[in-house]
Amino acid sequence: MDYDSFLELAKTRRSVRRFKPDPIPDEYVDKIIEAARWAPSGYNTQPWDFVVVKDKKIKDSITQWVGKYWAAAIEMEETREFGQKQGDFPWHDEDMDFRIAPVYIILYGDTRTKIGLPMFIRHYPNLRESIYNSSLANAFMYMLLAAQTLGLAAQWVSLIAEPYIHCMVKDLLNIPRELEPYDMLVLGYPALKPRPKLLRPSDKMVHHDYCSQEEFRTDEEVNDFARRTVTWTTATHRRGVDKKMVG
Ligand SMILES: Cc1cc2nc3c(=O)[nH]c(=O)nc-3n(C[C@H](O)[C@H](O)[C@H](O)COP(=O)(O)O)c2cc1C
């Protein structure tokens, strides 16, 4: 693969939160997980386990638990600092369209794998946890990239790791105590084209040898981008199905 093809993949890999209910081939799921197996991990610990969910009843239960938790999340938004507050609660996709997507893959981390890290990392909690989580993030990213090459829509559902949802899912799916949820990948065929991405400009992002004051963002610039990207993300969560794509 050349750089241009890679960049094209990186640019076209986007979160799509509107799905067609059509099933996807099992072979695609296998391919996505196969790609993730090759992800780099701290000390090659490969701390991942994948739980593929296709059963409608299980998917419905998960969606219901995520939906319940949102009530608290909405209340918490009221505590956001003045100046960053959104008029309306922002990023919740009320329809939770992922409920109709045909496949969920829950990526779990096996906490026992941390024993394979060198002693200086095992006994340095921040580093240990960041290496463990980064390894899982790499596997997740490989799945996203693979899904993109197969023409699938993909959405992260991070709430899967929230304690209430985690406990409910763990009980329903008989997840061993040693496994901790990292994130859930929702897969299906897209019912929406992603809108152009709000991307930070590259100036004040790259520093060569030395980071001068002029090339470092001010607090105001950081806050301004935060406001704009919340608005942008909200819009991407709330967009409806593109009827043309559903057919
Ligand atoms: C660590 C992480 C957690 C995320 N969690 C969620 C999530 O719970 N729900 C969701 O819809 N998107 C989630 N996203 C997706 C981001 O909102 C999305 O990547 C971002 O808005 C940029 O859009 P893009 O993916 O189209 O480039 C998450 C992304 C990351 C990196």
Image (spheres, rainbow, N blue to C red):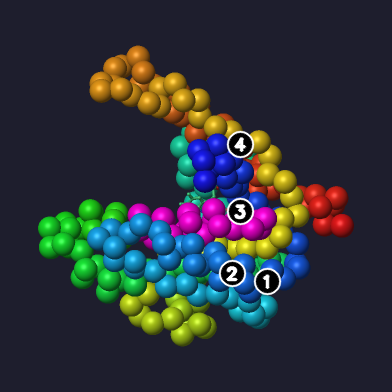
| Distance in Å between CA atoms under marks 2 and 3 | 12 Å
Helix, strand or loop under label 1 = loop
Number of the front mark, 4 or 1: 1
**Disc 3 CB within 8 Å of nearest ligand 1 atom:** no
| Distance in Å between CA atoms under marks 3 and 4 | 16 Å
Q: Who's the residue at 64% across and 58% down the image?
A: 150
Residue 148 got which mark? 3
Residue 206 is situated, as x and y percent measured from the top left of the image, at 38, 26
N-terminal label among 2 and 4: 2
Q: Which residue is mark 4?
A: 197
Residue 175 is situated, as x and y percent measured from the top left of the image, at 43, 81
**Disc 4 CB within 8 Å of nearest ligand 1 atom:** yes
Cβ atoms under marks 2 and 1 closer than 8 Å:
yes
Residue 143 among magenta residues: yes
Q: Who's the residue at 50% across and 25% down the image?
A: 201
Compared to 80, does 41 lie above or below? below
Residue 161 is situated, as x and y percent measured from the top left of the image, at 45, 65
Residue at the outermost front position:
1
Compared to 210, does 227 lie above or below? below
Residue 245 is situated, as x and y percent measured from the top left of the image, at 81, 52
**Disc 1 CB within 8 Å of nearest ligand 1 atom:** no
Number of the front mark, 3 or 4: 3
| Distance in Å between CA atoms under marks 2 and 4 | 27 Å
Quadrant (top left/top right/bottom left/bottom right) for the C terminus: bottom right
Residue 29 got which mark? 2
N-terminal label among 2 and 3: 2
- On screen, residue 47 versus residue 1, left or right, reads left
Residue 25 got which mark? 1
Question: From which residue to which does the magenta span run?
Answer: 134-155
